Amino acid sequence: MGGESQLIWGLLFGSIGFGFALYGKRQRAAVPLIAGIGLMVIPYFIANAYLLVIAGVALMALPYFISV
């Protein structure tokens, strides 16, 4: 997987992360806010598209399994 797929996955996870962060801020919930910020930031640090997908799916599942 090359640069195009990483760009598309980064855009997708960034958009979902923005939704999570907006929800977490409005509901004053820490876990969705942190997961959203993480989803928006990880495309800048992970260069491999496969690892990006794995990390993105893990961060999207985080608010489902952890509730504070």
Image (cartoon, rainbow, N blue to C red):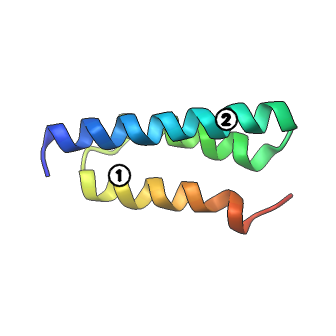
Rendered image: mark on residue 52: 1
Answer with the quarter of the image where residue 67 lies: bottom right
Q: Earlier in the sequence, mark 2 or mark 1?
A: 2
Task: Determine whether, in the image, residue 20 is placed left or right of residue 3.
Answer: right
Task: Determine whether, in the image, residue 64 is placed left or right of residue 53.
Answer: right
Image location of residue 54, percent across then percent down = 39, 61
Measured in 3D between alpha carbons, the distance from the residue under mark 2 to the one under mark 1, in whole angstroms, is 19 Å
**In the rendered image, the vertical position of residue 41 relative to residue 54, given as above or below:** above
Image location of residue 5, percent across then percent down = 20, 44
Image location of residue 53, percent across then percent down = 36, 56
Structural crowding at the residue carrying mark 2, measured as other residues with C-alpha within 10 Å and reported as few (<14), some (14–19) or many (≥20): many
Residue furthest to the bottom in view is 65
**Number of on-image labels:** 2
Structural crowding at the residue carrying mark 1, measured as other residues with C-alpha within 10 Å and reported as few (<14), some (14–19) or many (≥20): many
Residue shown at the point (33%, 44%) measured from the top left: 9
Type of residue at label 1? Leu
Image location of residue 39, percent across then percent down = 52, 42
Residue shown at the point (56%, 42%) measured from the top left: 38
Answer with the quarter of the image where residue 22 lies: top right
Task: Determine whether, in the image, residue 28 is placed left or right of residue 39.
Answer: right
Which element is circle 1 on?
Answer: helix
Q: List the residue tagged with mark 2.
A: 21
